[in-house]
Amino acid sequence: MAFDGVGWIAAIIIGGVAGWLAGRFMKTDTGIVMNIILGIVGAIVANLALGLLGISFGGWVGYLIAGFIGACIIIAIGRAVTTRRT
């Protein structure tokens, strides 16, 4: 995934915000580093998944939306995996 119109530093900042929003929405208690990772990885996952459906996001707002959606998906998957283990 290219950071369409978003540089690396901006991607980290936007990813952190997206991860933080997703953490609040999904009611998790993760730190800032995990928020950044969830937001960036979430944006990549969401862009790939939505790209298969023909939907693409660009720019800061698009990256924030994709990061939020993807981070929520990753949090949900993580909860499903940890719930099944116990």
Image: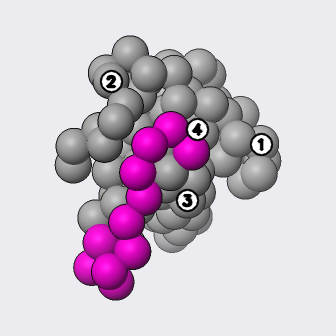
Q: Which of marks 1 and 4 is nearer the N terminus?
A: 4
Residue 31 percent location from the top left of the image? 61, 22
User: In the drawing, what numbered circle is on residue 19?
Assistant: 4
Kindly report which numbered mark, 3 or 1, lies closer to the viewer in this rendering: 3
From this view, report whether residue 14 is shown above or below residue 26.
above
For badge 2, the amino acid type reads Gly
Front residue of this view, candidates 35 and 52: 52
Q: Earlier in the sequence, mark 3 or mark 2?
A: 2
Query: Helix, strand or loop at disc 3?
Result: helix
Tally the marks: 4
Give the distance between the C-alpha atoms of the residues marked 2 and 4, in whole angstroms: 18 Å
Q: Distance between the residues labelled 3 and 2?
A: 20 Å
Q: Earlier in the sequence, mark 3 or mark 4?
A: 4
According to the picture, the residue beneath numbered tag 1 turns out to be: 24
Q: Position of residue 57 (x, y in %)?
A: 42, 58
Label 1, residues with CA under 10 Å away: few <14, some 14-19, many ≥20: few
Indicate whether 10 appears above or below 35.
above
Residue 32, x across and y down, in percent: 59, 19
Circles 2, 1 touching at the beta carbon (< 8 Å): no
Q: Name the residue under label 2.
A: 7
Q: Residue 43: say if magenta.
A: no
Q: Which mark is residue 69?
A: 3
Q: Which residue is drawn at 37% across and 66% down?
A: 56
Q: Farthest residue in the left direction?
A: 1
Q: Distance between the residues labelled 3 and 4?
A: 9 Å
Per the rendered image, the range of residues in magenta is 51-61
Q: Could you tell me which residue is drawn at 31 percent across and 21 percent down?
A: 8
